[in-house]
Image (cartoon, coloured by chain):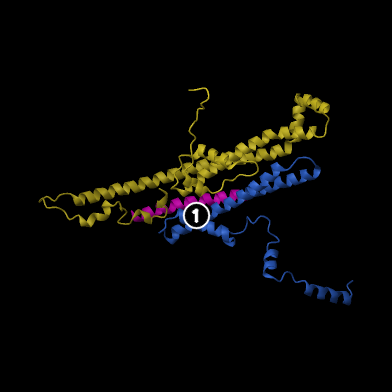
Amino acid sequence: MTTPRQFEANRSNARASTGPRSKAGKARAGRNARRHGLSSAIASDPAAAGAAEALARRIADDGAGPAAMALARAFAEAQIDLDRVRKVRRHVLGRLVADPDDGAEDKVDRSKLVRQLRRLERYEHRALARRRRAIRAFDQSFVEAVRQRA
Amino acid sequence: MSKNSVAVRAHPRLPSAVKKFWGPPPIGGTEKEEEYWSFAAAIAHDLDPADSIMMLLVRDVVDYSLEIRKLRRYQTQLSVLAKSKMNGGLSPQDIKQNERYFATAHGEADLFVDGLVTFEAIDRLLGLAEARRMAALKEIERYRKALAERLRERSDNAILAGEFSAAALGPDIDGAEPDRTDNIDAGRGETDGGKPLSDSPNSKRS
């Protein structure tokens, strides 16, 4: 049973530890649960968002309308996502092969890496499907544009 | 040919625009950048750098092909790794004895079982890479078909508009010259009802 004194001490301790206060500390703590960042949206990563926008502009015409630009953006975001997943997968695969196979502890680590690779497959599969859909939407939009003009 | 001369085979090269667009090659460990580019050039040296989507699809084929080759190499290396693991710390005499054992069917099976978990993991990755390479090739086929359809549509429209403008430009029965200023757009190839083709969402790609 907690005594009133302990209760008070707990409260005052809790008041003293309310997490990081500086901006940098808050930013760091905000990434505590982050594993590989592959679930995060492209928009939340400025570098990835910039790369996606540049790719979208390259794919669409310079004078493309907002609808065509949105389709190009969907494709570009899926492509950048795919690149992110592949980068992580290459890193994991490199570790799996580079690790020397000489100890029980290493074996556990190796199976962990194999599990990681399996999880990454899902992300790659999803990004590939998104990209495929984006290409088809792009083609479809052209067919519709031609039909409208005919 | 003189004794010292070497026959040099012309290696295909990847267009620099494609290299620039693909960015740094996805390599790691002991792999070399030049090896990646020569591998990519062997597959995609005649790639048209004007089509971004096609360039990305072809890059997939290159990367998956390279991955397949790499994973197959890893698989063959597994038995070598298992051998060196079993021979680790042994005297030269014991290593010799081990080598004799590995040369037997039983020894070979022993080596295989030792690396089975990793072998299976690599095998699974190989299967996936092969499936994805096939999917990328299929996507290229589909994309090219869609591109051909777009081209057909545009060329049909261009021919049709050309016929109309030719009819409008034809000589009048009374021999008077027609007024050509009204059909200037048709002469430039802007045929879709007067709307330039570049207005289409993906005209850059064809």
Indicate the colour of chain B: yellow
The tint of chain A in the picture is: blue
The residue singled out by tag 1 in the image is A55
Q: For this rendering, which residue is in front, B96 or B206?
A: B96
Can the viewer see residue B54? Answer: no
Residue B154, compared with residue B134, is above or below; it is: below
- The chain identifier of the residue carrying mark 1 reads A
- The residue under the point 37% across, 53% down is A146
Task: Identify which residue is drawn at 70% across, 67% down.
Answer: A25
Q: Residue at x 48, y 56 (%)?
A: A56
The magenta stretch spans which residues?
A: A123-150
Type of the residue with mark 1: Leu
User: Is residue B110 visible in the rendered structure shown here?
Assistant: yes
Residue B199 sits in quarter = bottom left
Is residue A133 covered in magenta?
yes
- Per the picture, the main secondary structure of the magenta-coloured stretch is helix
Disc 1 packing (10 Å; few <14; some 14–19; many ≥20): many
Image position, residue A54 (x, y; %): 50, 57
